[in-house]
Image (tube, helix red, strand yellow):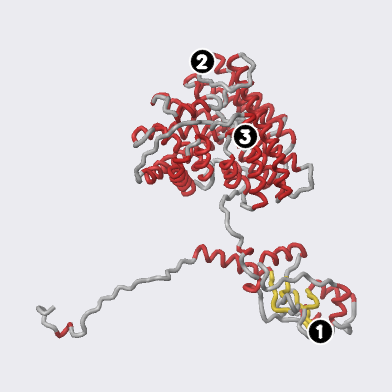
Amino acid sequence: MLVLAGMASIVGTIGVVAAFVLVKLIALVTNLVWYGTISGSLVSLAQAHRGPWMMIAPPMGGLIVGLMARYGSEKIRGHGIPEAIETILIGQSRIAPRVAVLKPLSSAIAIGTGGPFGAEGPIIMTGGALGSLFAQFFDLSSAERKVLLVSGAVAGMTAIFGTPIAACLLAIELLLFEWKPRSFIPAAVAALVAIAWRPLVFGTAPLFPVAIVLPAQWWTIPLAGGFGVIVGFASIALTLALYRVEDAFHRLPIHWTWWPSLGGLVVGLGGLVEPRALGVGYDVITSTLSGQLAIATLVSILLVKSCIWLVALGSGTSGGVLAPLLIIGGALGALIGLVLPGSPAIWALLGMAAMLGGALRAPLTGAIFAVELTGDLHALPLLLAATVCAFAVSVLLLPRSILTEKIARRGQHITQEYAIDRNQLTRVGEIMVRGVETLAAEMPLAEALARTLSPDARHVAFPVIAKDGTLVGVLDRTQALRSQQEIGGAEKLHDTLATRTTMPDVAHPEDVVARVVDLMIAGDQNLVPVTERATGKLVGIVTRKDLLVVQREAGALERERARFFTRTLRRHAPASASNQHPSAS
């Protein structure tokens, strides 16, 4: 863990550099394409000229990205996070060097020519690629490479948004698929290194500094929960629409190289209607949170941004999901907030967070992300209520999120539910078989072979014990057959064990079952003897069949319901009630 944390500090610095380069590339392409200037400062496309060029630039950018994906690496297609997840789970956390180069370049071209994306998805993939490349210079396991890959992704996200805690939560909820100190601490180190470098690169202020007035009444929390339910349904609609669009592209009779260019045509049409919907749109988020946008503008941004983002992303171009989801969720929240108490800005903020909670299924990331983006801690309870309710709606109504659905369509089932391994809790003494049938070490070999190879034998292997009850070895059927063919039957059993087998690994009653699993895998054993630690005497065995007991008990904890406290209502009538006069009653 400490070695990985030291490596993560280096990866964190690399991630900041990657984020800086990506932002400057996006700004450079944006300024050059739309305003004819060479500058590294991010600019809004709200003032972009609505003319023929708006129908040319996005398709041109899509065409370049399509060609880069076809002749460079197909891994640059999409929004980055599913590709990072897939690399972690089935790619042994190994990313090719060309992905680290082509992903930021293709994303800068796609976003700079008007693509309605944010930089966070590309930087997560780029930072992850650089972390993976760094790890591949060392003798590390796949699990250790994963830690450095995620550290690079966390550092890149922290550098872009200035949200180290949300980046760490994103790693836990979406990327690591575990919560171990070995994984979490290096990722946190990378985030802290990135946030330490950020003032020198991007400044210290929150990305969207706003002042929000919160309603003080108690009922605002359940109201925020109900609001989260509405946004949760909206996140489901976006997820379903995205993959309907993707299915439509797959039905086209042309190669996928040309799809991003077709998506660019739709982006250009959307830009003619509402130029603010093009590009990263950070200025739109700031205007939404500050309440500067009129109702008609909010409606226009919501509809146009949703349409062009769905089509562009479904076409397979390179871009992110966080910023578009923030814009869509914020516009929806601001519109709903017009009929709710309090400032529409608070509902815009809740809409942003709830959209992340529902679409990405990362409720904690969504809540903390909104707080760190705005610097307003007072909204945290309402943010938690909204994100959790949106998350609950999404989980109940959709089998997968907007991220994992993409991976599932490639044949990989992804679950984001973490649980304790019951093998780490259960002791060997709880599942071992006692009263084991054994073989005496002094037994003639012929007799031992006959018992081992008998059709009525209870086990495929038999522990061999000395006179004092200590274990001296194990005789299985394979060894018995070999011994039957190679030597005579006059020998003693312990002589055969001493010359032709080795002492098997053993477990002890107080060990956890996970140790038995490791021993079986390492030694390819069907049976693990259980001995007393102090004396070495055999007290039981564990077979592969016995391991199923742990899984059965874990299932019973989930399925079997019982009531331990009951209340019986009884009517106590007087014993002589039947002899009483009605009037007396």
Image height of 463 relative to 143, above or below: below
Distance between the alpha carbons at the discs numbered 3 and 2: 33 Å
* Residue indicated by mark 2: 50
In the image, is 180 to the left or to the right of 564?
A: right
Q: State the residue at coordinates (65%, 31%).
A: 19
Distance between the alpha carbons at the discs numbered 1 and 3: 73 Å
Q: Which mark is residue 207?
A: none
Q: Secondary structure at mark 2?
A: loop
Q: State the residue at coordinates (45%, 36%).
A: 349
Q: State the residue at coordinates (40%, 42%).
A: 224
Task: Give the x, y percent position of residue 165.
Answer: 57, 42
Type of the residue with mark 3: Ala
Q: State the residue at coordinates (40%, 24%).
A: 294
From this viewpoint, which residue is outermost toward the left? 583
In the image, is 384 to the left or to the right of 188?
A: left
Circle 1 packing at 10 Å, graded few (<14), some (14-19), many (20+), is some
Circle 2 packing at 10 Å, graded few (<14), some (14-19), many (20+), is some
- Disc 3 vs disc 2: which is toward the camera? 3
Type of the residue with mark 2: Arg
Quarter of the rendering containing residue 190 = top right
Q: Secondary structure at mark 1?
A: helix
Task: Give the x, y percent position of residue 570.
Answer: 28, 75
Image height of 435 relative to 351, above or below: below
- Disc 1 vs disc 2: which is toward the camera? 2
* Residue indicated by mark 1: 447
Residue 139 visible in the current orientation? yes
Residue 83 visible in the current orientation? no
Task: Give the x, y percent position of residue 382.
Answer: 43, 43
* Residue indicated by mark 3: 159
